[in-house]
Amino acid sequence: MRRIVAVTGGKGGIGKSSVAVGLALSLAADGARVGLLDLDLWGPSGHVILGIPRPGLHEDGGLVPDVVAGVAFMSIARIIGERPALLRGDDITNAILELLAVTIWGELDTLVIDMPPGFGDTLLDVARYLPRAEYVVVTTPSELTLATTRKMLELLRRLGLPVLGLVVNLVRGADSGAWRRAGAGEELRLLGSIGYDDAYEASLGDPDRFRRTGFFRDVRAVADALGADRLPAGH
Amino acid sequence: MHEWALAEAVVAKAAEVARERGLTAVSEVVIALGELQAVDRSALEFGLSAAQREAPELADARFTFETDLARCACRRCGHAWTLHDSLAALPEGERESVHLLPEIVHLYVTCPACSSPDFAILGGRGVSLVSVDGS
């Protein structure tokens, strides 16, 4: 795979999964070969957004991802459904390695990874085992989120991980300078602001409807800002 | 099943070990199969026989297997046990899920002493090379 983009953020409920799915659908709509790996082992939601209701395994020399609207998708939910995973410590690392090992992605231009909230084992494991990954940090304009976003950015810097930029989600009205308030500094790029969208909730489970939302329109602009990702397949 | 991928990985690793040790003709490769992974041994053997044709050092190698028992220790009460009977009792769909992602065994098995699902897996995971012998 040409590029790995991990969508991360310090808090839950800020839109990481929605942004990750939106980026994947956007890149796929432009003809790129795109995979989406949901690594939120405790609260996976990519399958909910994409409308894949039940666990189901298609095996052919490994686990074959579901393909929805041109996006190859894999998640722990495809194996355990809606049952709660009980994982800690080394089990987390091993589960991630297993998912990476058994999934048959084929040729991809971009693998988008939907990360769990926070700075725990999953982030450290992705940094360790997928050193080519680049990070998109999602935040909201709320100070409650920004306080953690600043820590996330500092941690990514300390780990020496490449940050593609910041996405500010759930913006009501004009963006009130969340990028600045994240303590970003000149080196951090604002990839885009995504407005609060009343129509978003009703689009869950229906990719076609999802792609008609204002949310998706704003995510398309984020995908544009990622630039090289939008090269068509094979480039 | 991902036995084909496992076979390719085992042969690649064994060939790497052979080269590091200066072995040009490997006679035996001993492989430990984690009980938790429930690898289909016959499928793995078939895959190994195909994969070894791509590795000159292993062309005449014999593959032998050991079982790495799935040992557990409860984090709540300290009870230690092996999962053999519990795994055998799982419905096929759940066994297949554990085969793919052994860590989710916590969903289906609890400590026989205190019923806690919070236990450490001490052994029985994965597939590992025990030894590579030859000349």
Image: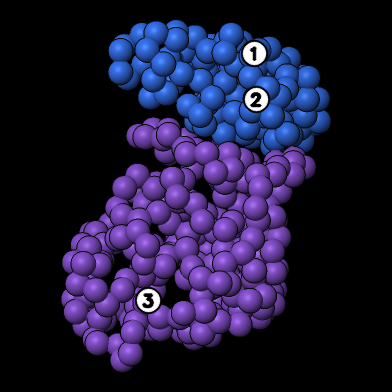
- Classify mark 2: residues with Cα within 10 Å, few (<14), some (14-19) or many (20+): many
Q: Between A37 and B127, which is closer to the camera in this rendering?
A: A37
Establish whether labels 1 and 3 are both on one chain: no
Q: Amino acid at mark 2?
A: Arg
Asked if B22 appears above or below B82 in the picture, the reply is: below
Instruction: Give coordinates of residue B93: x percent, y percent.
Output: 69, 29
Establish whether labels 1 and 2 are both on one chain: yes
User: Which chain is mark 2 on?
Assistant: B
Question: Residue A48 appears in which quarter of the rendering?
Answer: bottom right
- Residue matched to label 3: A169
Spatial distance from mark 1 to mark 2, Cα to Cα?
8 Å
Asked if B113 appears above or below A89 in the picture, the reply is: above
Q: Say how the picture is coloured.
A: by chain
Q: Colour of chain B?
A: blue
Left or right of A190 on screen, residue A78: right
Instruction: Give coordinates of residue A235: x percent, y percent.
Output: 66, 77
Q: Colour of chain A?
A: purple
Q: Amino acid at mark 3?
A: Asn
At 62% from the left edge and 46% from the top edge, which residue is drawn? A78
Q: Which mark is residue B95?
A: 2
At 31% from the left edge and 91% from the top edge, which residue is drawn? A174
